[in-house]
Amino acid sequence: MSETAVLSVNRVNKHFGGIVAVKDMTFEVQPGEVLGLMGPNGAGKTTLLNLIAGVYFPDSGKVLFQGKDITRCAPHKTCHLGIARTYQIPQPFTHLLVRDNLRVAATFGSKKGDTSELDEILDLVDLSKQKGMMAGDLATVSLKRLELARALATNPTLILLDEVAAGSTDAEIPRILAIIKQVRKMGKTIILVEHVMKVMVEAVDRIVVMDKGEKIAEGTPGQVMKDEKVLAAYFG
Amino acid sequence: MKIPRLITLIPVAALVVLALFPVIGVSLSWLNYLFLFFIYLALGNMWNLLAGYSGLICLCPHAFVGLAGYTLAIGTLVGVPFQVGLIAGAVVAALFALLISYPVFRMKGIYFAIGTLVLPEVLRVWFSFWRPVGNVYQGKGAGYAVKGIADITLGDTYWLGLAIAVASIFLVYIILRARLGLGLTAIRDNENTAASAGVNVFRLKLYSFVIAAFMMGIAGAAYYIFSPRINPVGGFSIRWLLMPLMATVIGGEGIEEGPIIGSAIVTFLTFLLAPYGAWSLFIQGIILLVVVTVMPQGIAGLLRQVGAYRFPARLLQAVEGRIYKA
């Protein structure tokens, strides 16, 4: 394991009852990197994100964030350390205004409780016009953007993006790619779970492929797509 | 000097008028009604803070009221001044909240509600047998009279109730505009998201729970200065839960003025329906059912929805314009 990794996941296991959700998972993410996490439905991708964010604790194994052991850190603590996450199914504060959704994240999540950059974040994800709306009244696509905005408002080092592009039309994909690139330019490290292949191929540096809780391949998008195990997992 | 806005002057004027009532010879029965209104208002405000803003359906206000009442009664029996007993009662209620927080916060939503509901029952039974001071024959381990309040007039207790009600309104007002309020509303909307946005869910819930317990304790102890005899059945009576619950739900849960409107209504109904005895709660229950069916946001929610505040607000602005032009 290298000293410089932002995140290192080391032989992590998690099962729910008799079902193995994540098995012996090991990988690292380097600073500024965009790592793609791929796999068929039920491969354990979201569980893995939950293990990193502290929603679940692993049965065994270790998670290190910037060299610090965060294996058994609660979600609000991992957030304070600099890990932000979005939810696959948007989970907004429905009875709060869009801007207040971000204000919660900035006030409680960022180190200084700094709310000065909220308008820039809203601009970045194209939600400026809706900032005075109730979050519960937003359309699904906007809710996905709000997830990302809320994550950014905590001023994180590492962002876990769980299917930000899912449900978007083809016309919206380039904008999402541009936003991800912009976030990357801000110096954030990203783990991206995605089914939309176009986003995966264009946005990420490296891909980890999971199947049935295990890592079956790792490499650049080009390498991974040719991997026999990956093809077998997806196409049988 | 900044000119005070009419909108702030109106509550101040109302407060002054209310405070003058005992002096200007308002009848004792009216002071009586209003005192109970103040106590229900304070309880309702705190219940609204928990249920409406923190997502905690707390079904144990009668634990806080009973504990505070007993602390006051036992305190005055051993010679503590009632003022100290009042504060001590609130502190005991807050400590009790702190003590039970860890186990009850492990339960979420409806489980939390049920978990809290059994606590006052346990306390009621406990206080039926446990008698820390005083002779056993004074009610077989049950009742206590509050001592040392012979000089207190109804006017004094009235002012105490008024002060507690106003304090509870201010407390909610301040909390909702502070960092704590933002975090609490986030928790109420979505606990998981709140946690992943950095909110320490347990700690914030604990703050609001303990604050509410303290305030409910003070309100409860004040009631036992007004009605200076406590026993387990009365002190841990479910009416201390039903009154704030109905006040909040009828008035409008999660709306600041909700419990104010609601507690005025339930107090009025309590006296109106008093001649019908046990039917009173039954009738109030039916009213509650009708309200939640017809206006799920409560009366204040309905008023906001139909824009009922718009006309008075415009009227105020117009009057302000006239006054300040002159």
Image: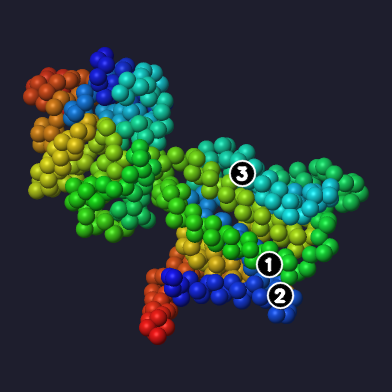
Q: How far apart are the two marked residues, 1 and 3, measured between alpha carbons?
A: 27 Å
Residue under circle 3? Answer: B97
* Amino acid type, label 2: Pro
Going from N to C along the chain, the mark reached first, 3 or 2, is 2
Going from N to C along the chain, the mark reached first, 1 or 3, is 3
Nearer the observer: mark 1 or 3; the answer is: 1
Residue B159 image-quadrant placement: bottom right
Query: Element at badge 1?
Result: helix
Q: Are marks 3 and 2 on the same chain?
A: yes
- The answer to whether the residue labelled 1 contacts the one labelled 2, judged by CB atoms less than 8 Å apart, is yes
Residue under circle 2? Answer: B22
- The answer to whether the residue labelled 3 contacts the one labelled 2, judged by CB atoms less than 8 Å apart, is no
Query: Element at badge 3?
Result: helix
Closer to the camera in the image, B178 or B111: B178
Residue A124, labelled with which disc? none
Residue under circle 1? Answer: B159
Q: Indicate the position of residue A148 as horizontal and vertical percent values.
A: 25, 43
Nearer the observer: mark 3 or 2; the answer is: 2
Horizontal placement of A124 versus B288: left or right? Answer: left
Q: How far apart are the two marked residues, 3 and 2, measured between alpha carbons?
A: 35 Å
